[in-house]
């Protein structure tokens, strides 16, 4: 619940008992629950009003998609991941390249080695 473990919940209960006392703690907990319900209802209503105002073409709109992390993942990385997952297998590549020129794999450079310099390439 909210990323809290049993130890954190127990500590919050003890702190609540010390701050509010055993008489007022149930009232405070009920108020906190009611406030949380009202905030959730407000957020749901705002999201539904936004979807209604945007029209039918945005019926699948999710405000969480506006978060930059989700936006980049959805619009940029999904295409890359789809292309990566659709790569042909090595057997398919061998069948296509049968008889065709396939370059030799490049050797890795050792520590401190400089790559070959080609003055015509620059």
Image (tube, rainbow, N blue to C red):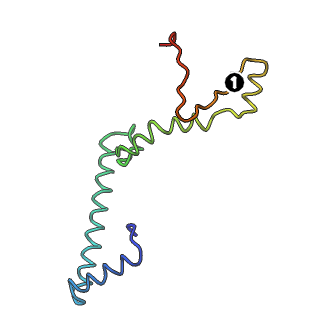
Q: Between 119 and 82, which is closer to the camera in this rendering?
A: 119
Q: Quadrant of residue 56?
A: top left
Residue drawn 68% across and 21% down? 103
| Horizontal arrangement in the rendering, residue 67 relative to residue 32 (left or right) | right
Judging by the rendered image, the residue that carries numbered circle 1 is 104
Residue drawn 44% across and 42% down? 73
Q: Quadrant of residue 6?
A: bottom left
What is the x, y in percent for residue 105?
67, 27
What is the x, y in percent for residue 64?
37, 49
Residue drawn 58% across and 36% down? 84
| Horizontal arrangement in the rendering, residue 86 relative to residue 46 (left or right) | right
Q: Quadrant of residue 26?
A: bottom left
Residue most extreme to the top: 120
Residue 96 position (above or below residue 71)? above
Label 1 Cα neighbours within 10 Å, binned few <14 / some 14-19 / many ≥20: few
SS at mark 1 in the image = loop
What is the x, y in percent for residue 70?
40, 45
Q: Between 81 and 51, which is closer to the camera in this rendering?
A: 81
| Horizontal arrangement in the rendering, residue 19 relative to residue 36 (left or right) | left
Q: How many marks?
A: 1
Q: Between 110 and 3, which is closer to the camera in this rendering?
A: 110
Residue most extreme to the front: 112
| Quarter of the image that includes the N terminus | bottom left
Residue drawn 50% across and 39% down? 78
Residue most extreme to the bottom: 23
What is the x, y in percent for residue 85?
61, 38
Residue 62 position (above or below residue 36)? above
């Amino acid at each position: 619940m909210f990323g809290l473990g049993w130890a954190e919940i127990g500590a919050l209960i003890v702190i609540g008992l010390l701050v509010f006392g055993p008489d007022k703690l149930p009232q405070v907990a009920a108020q906190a629950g009611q406030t949380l319900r009202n905030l959730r209802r407000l957020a749901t209503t705002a999201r539904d009003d936004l979807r209604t105002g945007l029209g039918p073409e945005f019926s699948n709109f999710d405000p969480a998609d506006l978060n930059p992390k989700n936006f980049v993942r959805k619009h940029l990385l999904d295409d890359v991941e789809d292309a990566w997952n659709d790569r042909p297998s090595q057997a398919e590549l061998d069948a296509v390249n049968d008889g065709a020129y396939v370059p030799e794999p490049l050797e890795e450079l050792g520590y401190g080695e400089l790559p070959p310099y080609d003055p015509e390439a620059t």
